[in-house]
Image: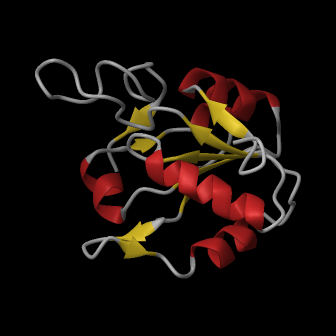
């Protein structure tokens, strides 16, 4: 893993890094449908905005061919910490690997993502993840 990307980070640790490091960026790689219907991270208390750049495109769920170029436009500094977020941590890991391959040295995958694992009732948002950790978020 260390060669693929900088590593995995828990949501609360990602929040702490965003708060501590002025050039740290959160890239939400979920789809527009997820942003609209599930919610988005709220970084306003940090004076920041998340970057919204889908790893896959809804509804086909095909890989976004512009993902890397669009991310490079927003994050010009290859040494800036980039924290990638998806629903559960799979797409964000792939995004972290892709950007590391482009020369970005501090790409992190936020473990458990925005919604996290399912509980016993097969519902998300209560066991793990950004929302379960009570980190700021809003409906978009």
Counting the numbered discs, the total is: 0
User: Residue drawn at (74%, 70%), measured in percent from left and top?
Assistant: 72
Q: Is residue 123 above or below residue 34?
A: above
Left or right for 86, reference 24: left
Residue 70: x and y in percent read 64, 75
Residue 91: x and y in percent read 47, 54
Q: Is residue 15 above or below residue 61?
A: above
Quarter of the view holding residue 76: bottom right
In this view, which residue lies farthest toward the bottom?
Answer: 65
User: Residue drawn at (87%, 60%), measured in percent from left and top?
Assistant: 77
Viewport quadrant of the N terminus: top right
Left or right for 123, reference 51: left
Residue 43: x and y in percent read 58, 38
User: Residue drawn at (25%, 73%), measured in percent from left and top?
Assistant: 59
User: Residue drawn at (32%, 18%), measured in percent from left and top?
Assistant: 127
Left or right for 60, reference 54: left
Residue 103: x and y in percent read 84, 64
């Amino acid at each position: 893993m260390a060669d693929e990307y900088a590593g995995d980070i828990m949501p609360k640790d990602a929040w702490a890094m965003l708060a501590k490091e002025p050039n740290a960026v959160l890239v939400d790689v979920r789809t527009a449908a997820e942003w609209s219907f599930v919610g988005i991270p709220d970084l306003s208390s940090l004076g920041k905005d998340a970057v919204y750049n889908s790893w896959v495109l809804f509804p086909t769920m095909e890989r976004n061919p512009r993902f890397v170029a669009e991310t490079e436009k927003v994050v010009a500094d290859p040494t800036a910490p980039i924290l990638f977020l998806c629903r559960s941590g799979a797409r964000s890991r792939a995004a972290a690997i892709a950007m590391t391959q482009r020369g970005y040295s501090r790409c992190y995958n936020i473990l458990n993502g925005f919604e996290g694992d399912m509980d016993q009732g097969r519902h998300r948002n209560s066991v793990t993840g950004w929302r379960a950790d009570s980190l700021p978020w809003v409906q978009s």
